[in-house]
Image (tube, coloured by chain):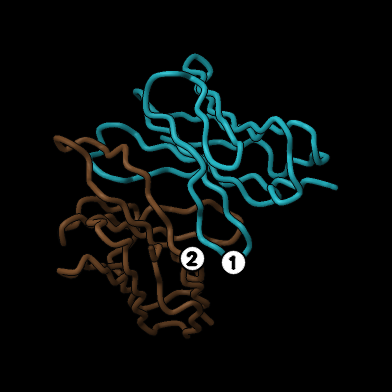
Chain colours: A cyan, B brown
Amino acid sequence: AQSVAQPEDQVNVAEGNPLTVKCTYSVSGNPYLFWYVQYPNRGLQFLLKYITGDNLVKGSYGFEAEFNKSQTSFHLKKPSALVSDSALYFCAVRPRGTGGFKTIFGAGTRLFVKA
Amino acid sequence: DAGVTQSPTHLIKTRGQQVTLRCSPISGHKSVSWYQQVLGQGPQFIFQYYEKEERGRGNFPDRFSARQFPNYSSELNVNALLLGDSALYLCASSAHRGLAGGPSTDTQYFGPGTRLTVL
C-alpha cells in the first residue's frame, strides 16, 4: 500500500538552531513530493515541492527540503528556526499515473521552537 | 487576490442528518479537491473535480458526494452522518489537471476548512 511516514510526532528545537522534519514514503515510481504547514484553526499552506531536477528544493519562509531517491526520503530543513515556525507540518506525496490530484499525506509532525 | 474560501466555518449536526459544505476556488482555478482531516491525522483525499467533472475519488462511502458548478465553485454533501464523520473538511484549488491524463505538478492551495461536529 502507498504510504507516507513522518516518524516523529513532535520535534523540539531552540530558536536559532537548525531544524529537520523527517519524511519517508512508500510509493512506486517517482512521485511528486510536497510540504505543507498548518497553523491552529487554519488550512494548509504550501511550503515547497519537488517535481524533478536538483535534489535540494528551496521554498517559502527559508525552508528547504532534500530529496533522496535511494532512501525514498524528503526531509524538511531550515538553517535557523524561528519561534513563529512552531506549527504542524505535513509531508505529502502525489503518485504519478493516478491522473489527478490524489495526494497522500503523512500524519504530521508538530514543531515546537523555544525562544 | 482572494484565496480559497469555504463556508460555513463551523457546523454541528446530529447523527443521520445531511450536510452541505461549500467551496470557492481561487479566481482562474478550474480544479477543486476535497479532503477530510480527522483530529490527529493528515488530510485524506475524498474527491477531485475539474471542469465540472469528477476526476478522482478516494476510499469514501457513497454517502459522500460532490459537484462543481459552472463558476468552478463546489459543494460537498454527506448523507446519513455518522459520529466518525466529525472532522475538518478542506477544499483545495489548483489551475490545471494533469497533462495528457497524468498527475498534475500544480500546487494545490487550501482553504481554511469547515469544522464539522456530529453529535
Could you tell me the amino acid type at mark 2? Pro
Q: Residue B28: x percent and y percent?
A: 24, 58
The quarter of the picture where residue B6 lies is bottom left
Residue at figure coordinates x 53%, y 28% from the top left = A74
Is A74 or B14 nearer to us in this picture? Answer: A74
Q: Residue B15: x percent and y percent?
A: 45, 82
Label 2 belongs to which residue? B112
Label 1 belongs to which residue? A41
Subunit bearing disc 2? B
**Label 2 element class:** loop
- In the displayed structure image, the side of residue A37 where residue A26 appears, left or right: left
- In the displayed structure image, the side of residue B29 where residue B107 appears, left or right: right
Circle 1/circle 2 CB separation < 8 Å: yes
Residue at figure coordinates x 26%, y 50% from the top left = B95
Which residue is situated farthest in the front direction here?
A: B1
Q: Residue B71: x percent and y percent?
A: 19, 69
**Label 1 element class:** loop
Q: Are marks 1 and 2 on the same chain?
A: no
The quarter of the picture where residue A63 lies is top right
Q: Residue A69: x percent and y percent?
A: 47, 17
Subunit bearing disc 1? A
Whole-angstrom CA distance, mark 1 to mark 2, is 7 Å
Q: Is residue A112 above or below residue B39?
A: above
| Within-10-Å neighbours for mark 2: few <14, some 14–19, many 20+ | many
- In the displayed structure image, the side of residue B2 where residue A12 appears, left or right: right
| Within-10-Å neighbours for mark 1: few <14, some 14–19, many 20+ | few
Q: Is residue A85 above or below residue B7?
A: above
Residue at figure coordinates x 27%, y 39% from the top left = B104
Could you tell me the amino acid type at mark 1? Asn
Q: How many marks?
A: 2
- In the displayed structure image, the side of residue B114 where residue B94 appears, left or right: left
